[in-house]
Each structure stands twice: as C-alpha cells, then as structure tokens.
Amino acid sequence: MNIEPSGEAAEYGRQASRAFAAAGGDRLAPLAEAEPERRGALVEPVLRELGAWELRPRDDPDDLEAAAALCRSAGYRALAYPLAERLARPAGLGTDGLLVVDGPAPRAPVAGLDLRWTAVTLDGRRGEAVVRSGERSLDSAVVAELDVRPLDAAGAGDVALGLVLPCWTLLGMLDRALDLTRSHVLARHQFGEPLARRQGVRFQLADAEVERGGAEALAAYALWSVQSGRAEALDDALALRLAALEAAEAVFRTAHLLHGAMGFCDESPLSWVSRCSRPVRWLPLGLSATRDHLARRLGRHGLTGLFSEAAT
Amino acid sequence: MTGGMTGGGSAATPADLGAFRAHVRDWCRAHVPDGWRRAQTGVPDEEFVSFQRAWFQELRRAGFAVPHWPAEWGGGMPVAQQAVLYQELAAHDAPRLVLAFVAIHHAASTLLAAGTDAQRHAHLPAILDGEVWAQGFSEPDAGSDLAALRTSARREGGTYVVNGQKCWASGAAHADWCLLLARTDPAAPKRHGISYFLLDMRTPGIDVRPTRQATGESHFCEIFLDDVAVPAANLVGPENEGWRVAQRTLGAERGMTMLELAERLAHGGFRRLVDACARPGPGGARPLDDPLVLDRLAALETELTGLRALCAELVADDRPGPADASVAKLVYSELLQRLTDFAAEVAGPAAHTELRRPLSSGWESGAWVLDFVGSWEWTIPGGTSEIQRTIIGERGLGLPREPAGA
Ligand SMILES: Cc1cc2nc3c(=O)[nH]c(=O)nc-3n(C[C@H](O)[C@H](O)[C@H](O)COP(=O)(O)OP(=O)(O)OC[C@H]3O[C@@H](n4cnc5c(N)ncnc54)[C@H](O)[C@@H]3O)c2cc1C
C-alpha cells in the first residue's frame, strides 16, 4: 500500500496554486466576503481552465489525488469557494456538489452561488439542499443556511469523500499559516534582530509544524482509505477531521501569537486565511462534535489503522 | 505600585461584606439593563459608545465606577469590597466598562502616580464625567521592543512639537485624550530619551485612522502625528523619564485591572460554564454527569481560586514584587484560554455556530468559540506572554538579562 500522493498530483497542485495567485491571490477572500455573489465569476473560469470539473475523484484514483491536491492549493490561497464540496459531488444525481450536514439547522459555505447541491448526513440520508435566501445571521458572509428536502438513504458511500476533501483544503490553510508565520518571524525585527533568532519563537513554530505534519500524514492515509473503498473509510475520515481540527487550533494560535497585533488586522493575509478556515473548521462538525461522532463509531469496533494486517 | 490606586485600605468585616453584597445585588437587579446583550450585538459604533457612556454614569451614581481610586477622587472602596462588587457585577452579567477602560485604569494610575496637581484636577473629575482616553505607546517598529519607539517631541519654547505614528491604539477613534510616549532626546540610549505626555486629541495635526480587522471585533486605530503642539504643562514626570512613568502605566494594565478580570472570569465565565454543563445535551445526558468533565471543572476552579488570591494580594500590597503583575497577567491570559477552550468543547456543536458577541461583554461572554478565538488576542497587549515570561525570569528570578540583540 502506498499512501504517498503521486508526483503528478503535487505538480498539478503547484500549477493550481500559481493560477489562483494570478487570479487575485490574497484579494480573493476579502472580495468573496464583501460580495459572495461575485465569487463564482472570480474563480470558476480558473477552475474550468485547470480541468477541475473533469476530475472524477469517485471513479479514478489519480483524479482523487489530483482533487485533493487542488483543494490543498485552494486552501493555501484562501480561495473562499466550495471547491472541495463541488469535487465531492455524488454520482448520478445531476447536482453540482455534496454538502455533508449535521444537526437540525444545516449550514454550508455556499452563499451567493447559483449551484444545485445534494446534502448528506453522516448516516447517509440524502436530500436536495436549497440555500435559504435573505438571512445572513452569521458573521461569515459566505455561509448560508440550508433547507433540505429529503431524497433517499443511499448516501452512506458518499460521506467519507465529502469529509476528506475539505480537510485537504484546511491542510492547505495550515501550510499557508505556517509559511506566513515563518516569513514574518524572519522579517520582523524587535530588539535589534529578527524574531526568528529567539529560541522561544523557534520552539513555538516547531511545535506548530509538528501538529501540521501529523495532520498531513493522516490526510494521505484517509485519502488512500477512500481510494481503496475500505469499509472503515468513514472512520478514517472522521479521525482525519479530528486531527486536522486540532492541528488547526494549534497552528492558528501560534501563527496569531507570533504575528503580534498585526495578525488581527485586515492587511495581514494571516487574518484572512484564519477567517476563511472558520467555516471549514466549524461546519458541518466542530471539534467536539467530530470527537463525539468518532468516539461513538469507534466504541463499536475501534480503528483499523495502517498496520492491522501485519499485526494479525 | 500605583500611588494610592488601591482604594481604601481599611479591612471590611465579614458582616460589612455580607451587607455590601446584598446592597450590590439589589442594585444590580434594579439597574443592569434587561436584554442588553441581544440589543448590543452587532450595533453600530455610535450605539455602542452611547450605551457605554450611559452605563458608566449609572455605575458612577452608585459609587461603583472607580472603586479602586483614592477616596478624595471618588473611590476609596476597600479591596475586599471591590472584589465583592466585581463578583456581583459578573454574576448579574453586567456590561463591562470597555470604553472607559484606559481612562479609569491607565490614565488615572499615571496621573495619581506621576501627574501634577493641576493635571489631576484637570482630568480625574473629567474622567468621571465621561472623558475617554486611549493609549498611544506602540509603533510599527516598536511592539514588544517598546523602547525602540521613534515618535519625536521637539521642545520649542513652551511647547513640544510631536511627529510620528502610533498603532494598535484601542478605541482611539472615540478618545478625547491619549497617553503618549515620544522621544525627546534622540542621542540618549533607548530608554533614557523618552518622555510621557498627555495629548489632547483635538489638537491640529492629529489624524486617527481605524485599522480594519478581519474579525470586526476590537477597535484598533493608527494615530498619525504631524507637527502636533503639546503644551509643556502636559508633560508627565520629568523630561526623558517617560520610560519609568510608562512602566507604571503598564503595571496598571497588568496588575490593577486583573482584580476585576479575575473575579469576572470566576463569577461570570466559570459560572456560565458550570450552568452549561448542568443542562442536558442533545442525547439527554448532562456534561456534569461525566466524571471527566467534573474533573476538569474542579481543576479550573482550583486555578481560578489561585488566580483570584494572586490578584487580590497584588492590589492590596503596597510593595508588590517586581514580577508579580506579570505573573498575574500570564496566569490570567493562559487560564482564560484553557477555560474558553474547554467551554467550547463541552458546549458542543451549538457553540460552533454562534458567530457574534456584543462588544460590551467580557472576554468570556458565553459565545465560547468566539471567546476562545478572542482569548488568543489577550496574550498580546500590555506585553505578550513571552515578554511576561522574560520579566518573570529576569526581575522575579534574577536570571541574567536576555541578550538585547544586535
Ligand atoms: C487587543 C490588543 C489591544 C492593544 N491595545 C493597544 C493600545 O491601546 N495601545 C498601544 O499602544 N498598543 C496596544 N496594543 C499593541 C500591543 O501592545 C502590542 O501588540 C504588543 O506590545 C506586541 O507588539 P507587536 O504586536 O508588535 O508584536 P511583536 O513585538 O512583533 O511580537 C511578535 C511575537 O514575537 C514574540 N517576541 C517578541 N520579542 C520576543 C522575545 N524577546 N523573546 C521571545 N518572543 C518574542 C512576541 O511574544 C510575539 O509573539 C494592543 C494589542 C492588542 C492585540
């Protein structure tokens, strides 16, 4: 078994990252937040150009890796567009994307887009999701409340991919937060020298990188699990989500602390990456809900893991 | 530490305290505005400001606005009573004094410790009447290394001419006056050429620009100073001794404010957390029925008790240790982080969808996820956690000084 993503996928990701930078880069998130209705027009042409809509991640292992790499680049550039959700679209329903939802008041970061969505709950109940118009109750303009019209209970196989791809987006955000922080502590001088010369600063950055690296390893594993069609794919997806959310807290806390007050103001890309990460981190399951679901599922059978075959 | 900023010294007896608590409770029931949280969430700036002004005057009429000031200026409440006051305000979910914060703490402690009589008379009563203050210390290149500040003040006859740029000044858009640090002797070593001024924000040459924040929450401003004339009468302490005066103001930020914050965390935030744990979750079970939750709550309660004792001692003590205020700030800000993190955890999924909180609430508003994110901010102003650790190491433990760098 090989859980390392292929070189082609990584190259595709780099190409996508350049294309997103050329399409507006760090300006895209503020624009999306100011006018969610315009964000489709800003990024959809680039995604089309990149061949995003031709990817068949549910059918083709290479396409799945490419999709993950694309999501990671979108996260890196804080694209503020539901790319992972679109790439996870279910087979045979003719909709544009898949939204994993939970709880009585489902929401998703799909405001202002003229697209058709399928919603699926963790236990596989599917429905047609319609964005409720008018209400903007949340502080993120890209998040919308949904009305879900029930369809069937045939979505159990759809869920894992719907959870894994957004984690790749989040992983890209963590990559970016660490890159930004690394550059910041190298460039910012206090007490006559770069912050990066202080061991207290270096240790914090190192700890955050360890967290990010852990999430990256699990992301590769969960992707492989989906790819192989394993029965445990959903457990692995939830375990990835848990690890990615924990890593996100550690990474963003360190990134903010090391940026000082700068990290909380609009001009700093970190504040936008951090802000864009919130809907991904809180929807459809925040940290505690993810832990709760995972614990309940594992309570029945435990995680299978990478080395279980060797162990038996 | 702050020249009499600890209110009255006489110890109140337990019976006095009981009666006082009953009095504050009655007052809170009658005066804390009903539904202020909902009414204040997401309101425009002007509404926040008028709400804060009205609340300050309400507290003032009751003698609760500046209990920590000396009696002759309208305070004089014994520390034990102050603690009770803050406890009850928190327990009744009273709004915090956000707008007046710098005025009643930083400005007042500076004036009391180092101001002239004329300065005190000009400003302490005015603060009670609603004069709003900001703190103009930080600069783009002078954050943790505050002594690297470059804003200059050149003496010309009876005035100083000030040029430079300040940043991160909280609430400066609404400020009438500003505590200003500027360099008066460019040739002197870093800490020795700085002076401390009171700056009238209506003076020509001042341009205040709000710094947009992605969270839309707190209110940083940049202050641009272009040939701003400050009368020499507004110098606080001797020329070139501003660093020493500033240490006192920062001491107030780390120390004096802590009594209120600690009591609020314990009697507002923590109580709210315990209440939340007592409510049945979606599955019917109460978090309180889980021994792990109980264990965490007990640990937090223990830490809070320690913090409260630390803060009470800090304000009651005439001669606190050189690192005591730093210890209190460090403990508070990191405990706030742990508490809000755990609260977001037990409050469960619902907490993750509440995406706004009113500005007038405390740092533990009960919108736990936002509180947790906001708690990251708390480790930065008034000296970051690393700077507090450095102070504790050097001044508290007598370790060698950090290398100052190149
Ligand atoms: C909510 C908030 C309100 C504020 N209000 C005001 C105000 O009203 N008036 C005002 O003047 N200022 C205000 N500030 C500014 C505040 O005082 C500064 O942000 C603070 O001093 C840190 O400076 P900096 O942001 O430039 O960070 P930097 O000094 O650039 O520090 C960045 C990071 O490096 C670390 N670091 C720096 N030096 C060292 C070292 N020697 N060893 C180890 N680590 C180090 C820091 O801990 C931090 O994590 C406010 C800030 C915030 C966040």
Image (cartoon, grey):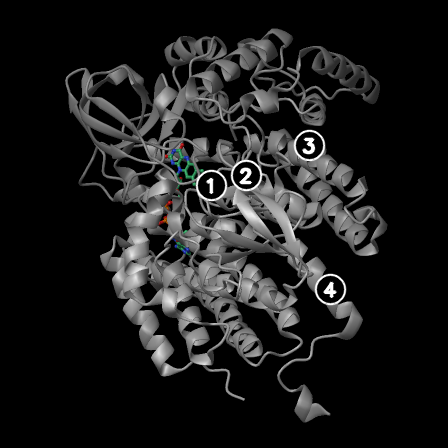
Q: Are marks 1 and 2 in contact (CB under 8 Å)?
A: yes
The answer to whether any part of residue B324 appears in the image is no
Is ligand 1 closer than 8 angstroms to the Cβ of mark 2?
Answer: no
Q: Quadrant of residue A245?
A: bottom right
Residue drawn at x 23%, y 22% is B206
- SS at mark 4? helix
First in sequence: mark 2 vs mark 3: 3
Name above or below for residue B307 compared with residue A306: above
Q: Position of residue B308 (x, y in %)?
A: 68, 37
Q: Amino acid at mark 4?
A: Ala
Residue B268 marker: 3
Q: Which residue is mark 4?
A: A295
Residue drawn at x 41%, y 12% is B123
Q: Which residue is mark 2?
A: B355
- SS at mark 2? loop
User: Crowding near pointer 4: few (<14 within 10 Å), some, many (20+)?
Assistant: some
Answer with left or right where residue A266 lies relative to residue B309. left
Same chain assignment for discs 1 and 2? no
Distance between the Cα atoms at labels 1 and 2? Answer: 8 Å
User: Crowding near pointer 2: few (<14 within 10 Å), some, many (20+)?
Assistant: some
